[in-house]
Image (cartoon, helix red, strand yellow):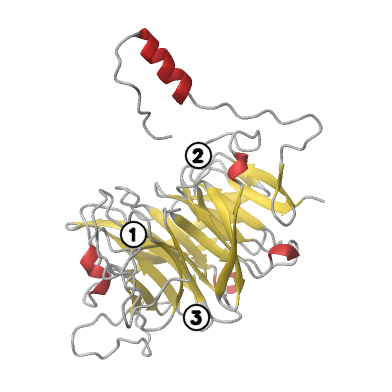
């Protein structure tokens, strides 16, 4: 809730009026006979199962082949869900993490051959003389122990201010890794090919540059790691293994959040074009379109603050197959985006009505990450520390 605006009249009566008008509204009681764990959506009823609410600012989730789960916490801890329960002790071995603003330990991805090589990849904010910057690292996870952690790629995206870090990662079908880097609150950097700020990067699994990246060999000093540019703060990234389509969501400033399809060498406009404004209401630019700059598939004004992103491909909830799901941090819900021929044709807000329900005791319901599990169900992480599973209510 934002700060209440109360009358300037001095006295007890004014305070009573302010309390009545702006006090939190208690949740409505669940009617008798209604399952408090079941919510109704446009297409079906969904049961929401709380696996744990004891996490501390979770950021990303990965499923281990033996059925367990790994979860990153922004403060720098790696947690294990074993046999459906959160292990009390954090897994050691993560490097020191800078946690200014929204920075910290962030995304997590298993190597495509993890079952054989036990290798995982993660991103975190590294501290240095020029502030902090996002880093891609790798390590081994075997027998419940993390070992051999080392930096693979340190982005040239240093900032003393913190935040707008991006830092989502996803494997491509060819084994390369996409990594998002935010503009670090420096608007001109999105169009500057001499920095990693405001870019989508593509790297080999050892952190080196793929020879076929679009800016390799340019004489103007463009960074060869860049795959696409002109993005602000990409907080969602998903690669469709079947089609190779790269889906990305990013935070605009005040308005202008975006869903994009990322294409090799393309420019997504930030901050030469945008649908948003500065946080103080001033204009960034009057242009929303320009030749040579891609338009978003969807733009959200006012901002929903899109976060983790996945494409549902399972058969457990056939009504949702082929649709995108993403967190909406500022509006506190999970958003469903229905697709048709690469276009968004419908959207739905999900789980917003969980606020005040017994199933989610903690607030707010800010969805940080959403993933499809090996059981072909959707799993949700919230900033308040919950791991939730969505399943059809039969």
Spot occupied by residue 281 in the image (x, y as percentages of width and height): 27, 50
Q: Which residue is mark 1?
A: 276
Q: Which residue is mark 2?
A: 364
Q: Is residue 97 visible?
A: yes
Nearest the eye: 337 or 138: 337
Mark toward the start of the polypeptide (3 vs 1): 3
Q: Quadrant of residue 155?
A: bottom left
Between disc 2 and disc 1, the foreground one is 1
In space, the residues marked 2 and 1 are separated at their CA atoms by: 25 Å
> Which residue is at the far top?
12
Label annotation for residue 9? none
Spot occupied by residue 137 in the image (x, y as percentages of width and height): 39, 66
Mark toward the start of the polypeptide (2 vs 1): 1
Q: Which residue is mark 3?
A: 175
- The residue located at (72%, 37%) in the rendering is 36
Mark toward the start of the polypeptide (3 vs 2): 3
- The residue located at (19%, 90%) in the rendering is 219
């Amino acid at each position: 809730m934002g700060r209440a605006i109360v009358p300037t009249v001095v006295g007890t009566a004014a305070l009573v009026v302010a309390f009545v008008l702006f006090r939190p509204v208690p949740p409505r009681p669940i009617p008798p006979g209604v399952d408090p764990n079941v919510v109704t959506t446009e297409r079906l009823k969904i049961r929401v199962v709380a696996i744990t609410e004891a996490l501390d600012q979770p950021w990303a989730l990965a499923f281990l082949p033996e059925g367990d789960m790994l979860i990153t916490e922004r403060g720098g801890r790696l947690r294990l869900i074993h046999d459906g329960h959160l292990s009390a002790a954090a897994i050691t071995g993560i490097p020191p993490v800078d946690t200014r603003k929204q920075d910290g330990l962030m995304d997590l991805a298993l190597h495509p051959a993890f079952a054989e090589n036990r290798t995982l990849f993660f991103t975190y904010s590294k501290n240095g003389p020029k502030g902090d910057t996002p880093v891609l690292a790798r390590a081994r996870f075997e027998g419940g122990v993390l070992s051999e952690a080392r930096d693979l790629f340190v982005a040239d995206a240093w900032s003393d201010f913190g935040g707008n870090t991006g830092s989502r990662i996803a494997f491509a079908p060819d084994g390369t890794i996409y990594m998002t880097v935010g503009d670090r609150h420096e608007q001109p950097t999105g169009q500057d090919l001499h920095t990693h700020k405001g870019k989508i990067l593509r790297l080999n699994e050892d952190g080196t540059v793929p020879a076929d990246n679009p800016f390799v060999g340019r004489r103007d000093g463009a960074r060869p790691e860049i795959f696409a540019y002109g993005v602000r703060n990409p907080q969602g990234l998903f690669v469709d293994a079947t089609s190779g389509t790269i889906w990305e969501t990013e935070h605009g400033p005040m308005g202008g959040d975006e869903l994009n399809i990322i294409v090799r060498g393309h420019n997504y406009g930030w901050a030469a074009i945008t649908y948003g404004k500065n946080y103080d209401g001033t204009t960034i630019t009057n242009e929303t379109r320009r030749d040579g700059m891609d338009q978003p598939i969807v733009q959200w004004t006012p901002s929903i603050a899109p976060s983790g992103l996945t494409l549902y491909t399972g058969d457990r909830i056939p009504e949702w197959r082929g649709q995108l799901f993403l967190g909406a941090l500022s509006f506190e819900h999970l958003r469903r985006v229905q697709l048709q021929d690469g276009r968004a044709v419908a959207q739905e807000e999900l789980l917003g009505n969980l606020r005040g329900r017994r199933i989610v005791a903690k607030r707010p319901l800010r969805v940080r990450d959403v993933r499809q599990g090996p059981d072909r169900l959707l799993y949700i992480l919230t900033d308040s520390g919950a791991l939730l599973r969505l399943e059809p209510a039969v």
